[in-house]
Image (spheres, grey):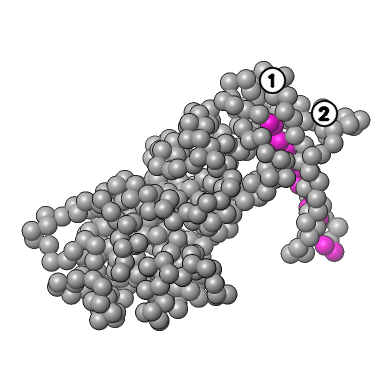
């Protein structure tokens, strides 16, 4: 009955001495996912959910010795290999994806703010995630080494993803040649914010200042549109330069085709206040500029539809789980729950509302975990 969800854990080794175990690993994992969907935030919450729903869970789980204690949930998630768990998740998430032409895969980092521990001498847990912005799915997660930064975690994350034909977007931290090479090797195009590599950035900025933004430059935007909403009027102008061979500091960037300058002019209605910002992008895409503008805007959905949801709806930053392995595995449980809840697109309820419905209605929970809610 739950084969689809069980596929998320296919190949995940049980880290316990199985002869002495009272509870099956698959039972522990499925109860934990259902509990997190149903708004559980701690090991105690997960146990409470399991005991409250034991009769229903027994209809499709073995539960040879009933519901595990919260200490059992905690110990198991401290023992599960997070690398193996994330690899299983990536395979499962990829299977959920439909066919979307030029899917925009945004990659960005987030910190689980209250997961640090002075006793264990480590700070809050930093994670980098991949987000399929058109389909609203988390595709993968990797921990950022506390001694480095996202530059080392992003290539590891890319290795777990199938990206053929996608546009991969990253902020300035990911604007690195070795990351670009990895993206191209995966059969995808890149679209990166350019705000580092001092000399190269200055050359790009000077070029656009001279050809597009300077007095009498004559540069015309390839895209010029107004967007009104939330008390603001926003004008976006996009300038493109395909003659990248003229800028010597950019010669080493793999398959670089176009430089973009995006000028955003915001006016707040009724205040007379106007703000202007110019951002620069490097891309290997040969798409129409309107497609690239949309891809740039979709990149920021990882903040609004993933990071914000994890913070506000799943209360991730309030989690006090401080064991590094357990915190990382619990973060992945939230992403499994998010992917499952997000697939229900038929109703008008918010994600918080859908989670509450699943907590109250066992039939609806079953439809979520078996994937029968997708429109």
Q: Position of residue 211 (x, y in %)?
A: 82, 28
Task: Read off the residue under disc 1.
Answer: 245
Q: Magenta stretch: give its range.
A: 258-270
Seen in the picture, residue 205 relative to 8 is either above or below; the reply is: above
Q: Position of residue 88 (x, y in %)?
A: 33, 50
Q: Residue at x 23, y 71 (%)?
A: 61
Label 2: how many Cα within 10 Å (few below 14, some 14–19, many 20+): some
Instruction: Decide whether the magenta segment is chiefly helix, strand or loop.
Output: strand
Instruction: Report how many numbered discs are placed on residues in the image.
Output: 2
User: Between residues 234 and 147, which one lies in front from this camera angle?
Assistant: 234
Q: Position of residue 244 (x, y in %)?
A: 69, 24
Q: Residue at x 8, y 58 (%)?
A: 19
Task: Read off the residue under disc 2.
Answer: 211
In which image quadrant can residue 31 be found? bottom left
Q: Secondary structure at mark 2?
A: helix
Seen in the picture, residue 375 relative to 307 is either above or below; the reply is: below
Quadrant where the N terminus is found in the figure? bottom left
The answer to whether mark 2 and mark 1 are in CB contact below 8 A is no
Q: Is residue 362 left or right of residue 132?
A: left
User: Between residues 272 and 121, which one lies in front from this camera angle?
Assistant: 272
């Amino acid at each position: 009955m739950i084969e689809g969800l069980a596929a998320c854990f296919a190949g995940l080794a049980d880290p316990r001495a199985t002869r002495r175990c009272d509870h099956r690993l698959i039972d522990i994992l499925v109860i934990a996912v259902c509990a997190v969907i149903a708004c559980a935030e701690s090991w105690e919450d997960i146990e409470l959910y399991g005991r409250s729903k034991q009769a229903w869970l027994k209809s499709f789980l073995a539960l040879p010795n009933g519901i595990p204690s919260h200490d059992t949930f905690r110990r198991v998630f401290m023992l599960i290999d997070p690398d193996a768990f994330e690899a299983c998740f990536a395979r499962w998430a990829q299977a959920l994806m439909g066919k979307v032409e030029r899917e925009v895969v945004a990659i960005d980092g987030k910190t689980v703010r209250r997961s640090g521990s002075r006793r264990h001498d480590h700070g809050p847990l930093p994670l980098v995630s991949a987000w399929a912005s058109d389909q609203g799915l988390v595709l993968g997660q990797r921990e950022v080494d506390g001694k480095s930064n996202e530059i080392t975690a992003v290539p590891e994350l890319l290795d777990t993803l199938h990206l053929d034909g996608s546009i991969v977007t990253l902020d300035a931290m990911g604007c690195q040649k070795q990351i670009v090479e990895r993206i191209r090797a995966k059969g995808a195009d890149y679209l990166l914010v350019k705000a580092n590599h001092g000399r190269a950035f200055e050359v790009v900025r000077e070029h656009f200042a001279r050809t597009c933004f300077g007095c009498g430059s004559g540069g015309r935007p390839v895209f010029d549109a107004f967007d009104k909403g939330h008390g603001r009027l926003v004008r976006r102008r996009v300038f493109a330069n395909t003659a990248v061979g003229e800028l010597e500091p950019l010669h080493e960037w793999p398959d670089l085709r176009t430089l973009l300058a995006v000028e955003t002019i915001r006016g707040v209605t009724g205040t007379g206040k106007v703000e202007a910002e110019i951002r620069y992008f490097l891309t290997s895409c040969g798409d129409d500029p309107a497609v690239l503008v949309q891809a740039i805007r979709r990149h920021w959905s990882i903040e609004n539809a993933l990071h914000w949801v994890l913070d506000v709806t799943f209360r991730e930053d309030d989690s006090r789980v401080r064991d590094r392995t357990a915190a990382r595995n619990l973060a992945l449980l939230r992403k499994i729950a998010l992917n499952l809840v997000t697939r229900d697109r038929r109703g008008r309820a918010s994600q918080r509302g859908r989670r509450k419905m699943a907590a109250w209605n066992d039939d609806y929970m079953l439809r979520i975990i078996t994937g029968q809610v997708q429109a």
